[in-house]
Image: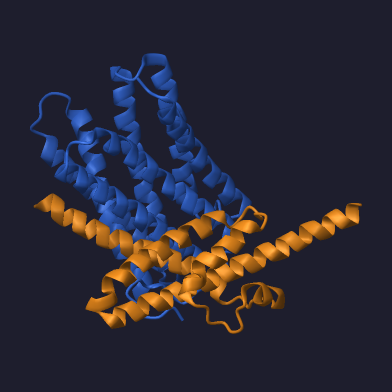
Amino acid sequence: MIAALIFVIAVAGFLQFFVSYCRSLIAAYERVDLSEQAREVTGINERQVNGQDFARLLQLVRMCPEPGDDSREIGAVRTYFGLLSMARAAFHRIAPSLEKRMERERESCAYFAAVALDRRIAHSRGLIAAQLSNQ
Amino acid sequence: MLGPVDYVYWMLGAFLPATAVVCACKGRVFLRYLPLSLYMLVAALLTVGRFVIFWKYGFPSNEYRYFYFYSDALLTICMFFALMGLYSHVFREMGFNRHVRAGALLLLALTCWFTFQVVMNSSAKLLTKFVVELEQNLNFVGLVLTYLLWGAVMKMRETRTQVIQLVSALGVYFSAFAGNYALHNLAPGHSTVWTYLPQILALWLPLAWAHAFVKVPVEARIATIPIAATHGSSQ
C-alpha cells in the first residue's frame, strides 16, 4: 500500500519535473523568430505552428547536418511531444479543455522543431560557405 | 559475471559525471555551482574507485561490497550538499544563505541521529547498517527537499534558466529513483529490469546538468509561470 502510494507520488513528481524541464528548453526557443528561408522550407507563415507538423519538421531537421549541440534537447522535446500526444488522445473525450491545453503545448513543440531546423539550415549554409571558400 | 553492457554502463557512469565537470569548467560555472560540480567529480572518482576494487577483489568480495555501500553513502551526502547549494542559489537574493547552510547541517545531523536511533539495537555490523540506513534516509530527505525547493522556485518566481533546469533535472532524477524503488517493492521479480533501470536513470543527471552548465548562459532568464507544469498555456 505504502509502495503504491510512493509510486503514484513519484510518477506525479516525475511528470511535473519533466514537463517543467522540457518547457524550460522550449521557452528559450520561443523567443527566436524564424528566418525567411526557414519559413519557405517549412511553409510556416506566422509564429503559430500546427502541432501535427512536429513529425514533418523533425524529419526535415534530421535531413540537415548536425551542429552537434541540439540533439539532446531535440530528444527530450520529442519524448515530451510523445507524452503530450498520448495525454491528448486520453483526454479527447473526457476533458476537451485539457485537450486544448495539450494541443497548445504540441504547437510549442512544433515551433521548437521549426527553430531547430532554422538553426541547422544556418549551420549547413555556413558549412557550404566554408567549403566554397576553401576551393 | 558481468557482461559487456555492464561494462558500458560502468564506463558511462564515470565518463558522464566527468563530462559534467568539464562542462562546468567550460561554461565557467564550476565555482558558481561548486557543490554540484564537486558532487559530479566525486561521482566520477568513486565510479573509477569501484571499478578498481572490483578488478582487484572481484564482484562478490566483501571489499567490493563494503566499498560500494560506503561510497554510495558518501555520494548521497555530497548530493545532499549539492541540493543545499541549489537552495542557497534560490534564497541568495533574500539573504538567507547562512540560514540555509545552518539548516542543512542541522537537518544532516538530525538525519544521522534518527538513523542511529533506528540501528542502535543491532549489535553486529552497527556501522555498516548505519551507513546503509543513512543513505536511504538521506535519499528520502533529498526527495522531499527537492519538491520543497521546486515549490520555492515557483513561489518566488525564480527566473534564472540555469537554476530552473538544474532543479527540475534533479527533480526528475529523484522522482524516477523513488518510482523505481516503489515499483521494485510492488513487483519484486524481473531482476534484470531492477539491475539496469537505476543505472540508466543515474545517467540522466550528469547529462542534464552538463547541458545546463554549457548550453544555458548564466544570465539567461525565463518566466517561471509558463514553465510550471500546471500552467495552462505556454506564453
Q: What residue lies at 22% left-to-right and 29% top-to-bottom?
A: B128
Quick check: A62 above or below B59? below
Residue B184: image x %, image y %? Answer: 20, 42
Residue A119: image x %, image y %? Answer: 66, 65
Q: Residue furthest right?
A: A135
Going by the image, does B27 lie left or right of B46?
right
Instruction: Examine the image and state in which quarter residue B100 appears.
Output: bottom left
- Pick the front one: B156 or A133: A133
Q: What residue lies at 34% left-to-right and 26% top-to-bottom?
A: B67
In the rendered image, the quadrant that contains the N terminus of chain B is top left
Going by the image, does A57 lie left or right of A14?
right
Residue B170: image x %, image y %? Answer: 38, 55
Q: How many labels does the image show?
A: 0
Quick check: A107 above or below B52? below
Quick check: B47 above or below A125? above
Q: What residue lies at 26% left-to-right and 58% top-to-bottom?
A: A11
- The colour chain A appears in is orange
Instruction: Examine the image and state in which quarter residue B21 appears.
Output: top right
Quick check: B230 above or below B164? below
Q: What residue lies at 52% left-to-right and 54% top-to-bottom?
A: A72
- Pick the front one: B195 or B136: B195
Residue B79: image x %, image y %? Answer: 37, 47
Inspect this view and state whether residue B226 appears: no
- Pick the front one: A75 or B133: A75
Inspect this view and state whether residue A86 appears: yes
Going by the image, does A32 lie left or right of A84?
right
Q: Identify the coloring.
A: by chain
Going by the image, does B102 lie left or right of A129?
left
- The colour chain B appears in is blue
